[in-house]
Image (tube, coloured by chain):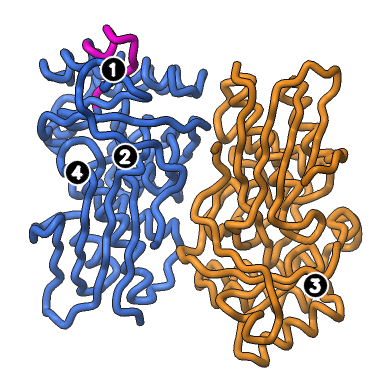
Chain colours: A orange, B blue
Amino acid sequence: MREEATAFVPGHITGFFSAHPDDDPTKAGSRGAGVTLTDGVEVTVEQTTAAESTIVLDGEELPIDPVETVLETLEVTARVEATSDVPLGSGFGVSGAMALGTALAANHVFERALSRNELVTIAHGAEVQAGTGLGDVVAQASGGVPIRLEPGSPQVNRMDAIPARARVEYVTFGELSTADVLSGETDQLTAAGKQALSRVVEEPTLLSFMYASRLFAREAELLTDRVARTIGDVTDADGQASMAMLGETVFALGTGLSDAGYEPSVCATHPAGAMLR
Amino acid sequence: MREEATAFVPGHITGFFSAHPDDDPTKAGSRGAGVTLTDGVEVTVEQTTAAESTIVLDGEELPIDPVETVLETLEVTARVEATSDVPLGSGFGVSGAMALGTALAANHVFERALSRNELVTIAHGAEVQAGTGLGDVVAQASGGVPIRLEPGSPQVNRMDAIPARARVEYVTFGELSTADVLSGETDQLTAAGKQALSRVVEEPTLLSFMYASRLFAREAELLTDRVARTIGDVTDADGQASMAMLGETVFALGTGLSDAGYEPSVCATHPAGAMLR
C-alpha cells in the first residue's frame, strides 16, 4: 500500500439539466450539458492510524456526506485533504469533485483494484444519495464540454461532448442549495431541460450551448436578480453568459464578463476528466 | 470558417485484443486493452484552394486511406499536415490518430457542428474500412489506460479504464501489417484476447494488464524472435514488457527496458483523450 495519493478533478458548471430520480442511486442522475474547468479540486487521500476518517477542505475540517459514503463503500479509514480553486455550494461541483477524487485516490492508496467505471459509479451514487448533485461526477469523469444524453453512472448512462475548447470566466455572488432546489417542484425545470438538450444535440456547438443554457435558466425560474442583471450586462456587451446550475454564479465564454466591466475569475475548459496526479 | 485548426491525438499501444467484424464499419471493432501515450500525433487541417486534399506526415506527402475517408465523409477538401512522435506501422495507432485528429480539426475549421461521438464514429468507421485498425480510434478518444469492453463506435461500444498512470518505455524494430494479420486466421487470437480481457476486467490494474498482454502475445503466436528476446531480457531484469499489437515493438512500464540495458524512447500514459489544441 502507498502512504498517499492525489487526484485532480476539474470543476464543472452545468448550464442546463433535467432531473431523473430512481430508487437506485447509480441509475438516478440528470440529462444536460456543462463545461468542465481547469479550475478544480485537488484531493489527497492519506492512510491514517486514527479510528475515524477526517475530511479537510481548504484547511477546514468539515463533514461532506458523499465523501464519507465513498470511504465507507471502499471500506477504508483515511485522511482526505482537498484544496479547491472554486467555492463550495456555488455551482462548480465541488462535492462531486471531492467524492470522485477521493474514490480515485483511495483506490490507489489502498489498492482496491477497482476499475475507473466502478470508482465513478461509487462517487456518483454517493453524490446522488446525499442530494448534493445529479450529474457533476459523470461530467467530471469525462472532461471537456460533456453532454449527458442518458442519466446515471457509466454502467447505464450515455455521454457525448461538444468538441471545442474555450476560455471561461465566472463571478460568484453566493450559494444556492442544490438539495433545496431538487427537493422542490421540478416539472417545469425538467421540461425546460429536455428542450435545451434537444437543441444542443441538434447543434453541438458552444454557441448553441450558451443559448440553450440562458433560455433554460429563465424558463426554469432559477435566476436571482443579481444573476439576471449580470447576464444582461454581458449580453449588452455582445457576450454570452448564463447561470451555473446550481449556484448564484454567472459564467461566460471568452471575455464576456471582462468586456462587461466585471472582474471575473478566469480559467478554461479542461480537456481531460478526473485524473491521478 | 477558420483558416486552420490543430488536434493532438495520443499514441495507443494495444496489449491484447479480439477482432469483432461486422458489415457496418461503425459496429465492427475490437475488444481489448492498451495504453494511450503522451507521445502522439499532432494534426493540422488547413483550408486549401487546391482541387484535391493533400496529406503530409512528417514532411512526406502520402496517401492515408482513413484520412481520405474522413475528409470525404465531412465533404471537405483540405491540406492535412501531421507530425508524429511515434513511427507509422509499428503498433502506435498512427493511422487512427491521423483519422481522429483530422475529424476533430476539420469539424472545427469547416464548422461542421458535429458532436464528439459523431467525429469519433466517422474516424473509427474509416479506420475499420481501411483495415488499418480496429480499436485505436475509440481508445485514443478516451485517453488513459482504456479497456474496450464492447466493440464499435461510441454509439454502440462500452469502455472502461484502468485508473492508473505510468511511465512507458518502448523500442521499435520494424513494421508489421495490421491488415495482413487481421485478414488471416484470427480464431486463436480471438480466444486468447477474450481470456486476457476477462483477466483484466476481474483485476483492472497495470500489473494484470501486462501479464495478460504477455500471455496473449505468446498464445496468439504473434511474437517475432527479436520481440520475444527483448521481452525476455526485461523479465530477466525483473521488469514487465510486452509486444505492441500490431508492430515489431516492445513496450514496458516504468524503467523495464532501461533496466534491461536498452535505450528506449520514454513517455507516459496520456491522461486525456484526443483534443483540439
Which stretch did the figure color magenta? Answer: B233-243
In the rendered structure, the answer to whether residue A158 lies left or right of residue B174 reads: right
Three-letter residue code for mark 2:
His
Disc 1 target residue: B259
Three-letter residue code for mark 1:
Asp
Q: Residue at x 29, y 29 (%)?
A: B169
Disc 4 target residue: B132
In the rendered structure, the answer to whether residue A76 lies left or right of residue B50 reads: right
Disc 2 target residue: B12
Q: Chain of mark 2?
A: B
Three-letter residue code for mark 4:
Thr
Foreground mark, 4 or 1, reads: 1
**Are dots 3 and 1 in contact, CB under 8 Å?**
no
Q: Chain of mark 1?
A: B
**Are dots 3 and 4 in contact, CB under 8 Å?**
no
Task: Give the answer, above or below, for where B62 lies relative to B218.
Answer: below
Residue A31 position, x and y percent, is 66, 57
Within-10-Å neighbours for mark 2: few <14, some 14–19, many 20+ = many
Q: Chain of mark 4?
A: B
Nearer to us in this view, B120 or A68? A68
Mark 4 to mark 1 CA distance (whole Å): 33 Å
Q: Residue at x 81, y 49 (%)?
A: A132
Inspect the magenta stretch and tell me whether residue B206 lies in it: no
In the rendered structure, the answer to whether residue A219 lies left or right of residue B158 reads: right
Within-10-Å neighbours for mark 4: few <14, some 14–19, many 20+ = many
Disc 3 target residue: A220
Q: Could you confirm whether marks 2 and 4 are on the same chain?
A: yes
